[in-house]
Image (spheres, helix red, strand yellow):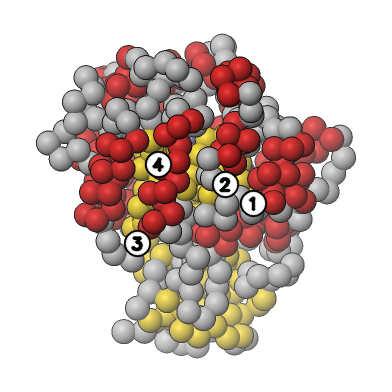
Amino acid sequence: MSRSYWLERAWLGGPSVTSGVLVTVDAGRFTRVETVARAPDYTHRLAGLTIPGLANCHSHAFHRALRGRTQAGGGSFWTWREQMYGVAGALDPETYYDLALATYREMLASGITCVGEFHYLHHQPDGTPYNDPNEMGLALVSAARDAGIRITLLDTCYLASGIGQAPEGVQVRYSDGDVERWQQRAAALASAQSGPDVVVGAAIHSVRAVPREQVKGVVTWAEERRAPLHVHLSEQPAENESCLAAYGLSPTAVLDAEGALGARTSAVHATHLSEPDIELLGQSSTRVTFCPTTERDLGDGIGPSRSLHRAGARLTLGTDSHAVIDMFEEMRAVEMDERLASRRRGHWSAEELLVAATRSGHESLGFADAGRIETGGRADLVTLDTSSVRTAGTGADLAAVVFAATASDVTSVVAGGRQVATGEDRAEVGRELDRVLQRVKERS
Ligand SMILES: [Zn+2]
């Protein structure tokens, strides 16, 4: 049965917004998008400014348990990783599901209708597979379904602690032993999952965690299925140094040599790159996934977002460690970080950043038919309050979305034609997170 929404103001693409847009939805897709000055009586009215659903291209759902518990400390990425491993060691399929469900509900309430979950917590704490070796991945898919968020489960190959080093400690939960066994397990997951709202993709954890000679096995697996392929790339200078020492090449050059770059690939972070690295990523049309709120929290550094864009690498965004779940903050942080690095303003337009958070993000996750309000597309609508204490008087245009709004300004979220969250849900989502995180804390 078709239904319709009347949008007071909407971004339909381009540099400006349109007033009075009536969208008709059938079977989860827009069947009509037209300009109608006044809301017809029969329709559901969405006041404020409506944009397409946001795509969160890089998530580790369980990192949500670290928020507020790790930020105050000192140290580096590597000391933070020890704290993260403490939580990773304590989770079982049930707590993983609960934590992911609450985290995905927080995402939905923040306007995120599609998540790319970079999943490597595969096995039991001693490394033994569960009865179903995909029990942990299936817990994430169930959590996404139950929350009402679309998911691309990026099943991650993780085989080594560092180049030439066997997995140690909690890392035994991540490893399948070799890439052939990873392929088999991931294939079983892919064939167990179908439906319009789930994509199973592949991930190479990093050149640290997948030996060079096994990278190709992940690439081939993704190629055969035309599935998205994601990879952590050059988040830390130490990764570059050890890669150069072992292979005589940068991590980007290793991925290029093994055929891992290309239009279906997304390189996550892409922080510490040389000019030749930037050229390789751009020429191969690889996407880059920046996660600025995590990168600043971990002291990673500022990646060359604009140089990558100029070279041809399309930008996408993710909330990664969930220090913050707010795609509006990620969008503006890309521009603000460039300003800090260059001491100049005006690198990214609001339109470009919105495209990164919507259309490009969905393409990176294998949902090329989402992230735009147009006939035939998936009917996702995120509506913002344009008269909140943050957005009042800002002009209710694209600049207001990118430079003033926050996730707390989201008043309604429609995914696949159905309203799945409203601003009123936030308090209940907070209480649910509180309950779940208390249980996880007691165990870790
Ligand atoms: Zn990550």
Residue at the right extreme of this rendering: 344
Going from N to C along the chain, the mark reached first, 1 or 2, is: 2
Q: Would you name the residue on which mark 1 appears? A: 284
The answer for how far apart the CA atoms under marks 3 and 4 are is 26 Å
Q: Is residue 136 left or right of residue 327?
A: left
Which residue is drawn at the image coordinates 38% and 49% (left, top)? 221
2 or 3: mark nearer the eye: 2
Identified by mark 2, the residue type is Leu
Identified by mark 4, the residue type is Gly
Q: Would you name the residue on which mark 2 appears? A: 261
Q: Is residue 71 visible?
A: yes
How many residues crowd around disc 3 within 10 Å: few (fewer than 14), some, or many (20 or more)?
some
Q: Position of residue 206 (x, y in %)?
A: 49, 31
Going from N to C along the chain, the mark reached first, 3 or 1, is: 3
Which mark, by number, is residue 197?
A: 3
Q: Is residue 411 visible?
A: no
Q: Is residue 442 left or right of residue 49?
A: left
Which mark, by number, is residue 217?
A: 4
How many residues crowd around disc 4 within 10 Å: few (fewer than 14), some, or many (20 or more)?
some
Contact (Cβ within 8 Å) of mark 4 with mark 1: no
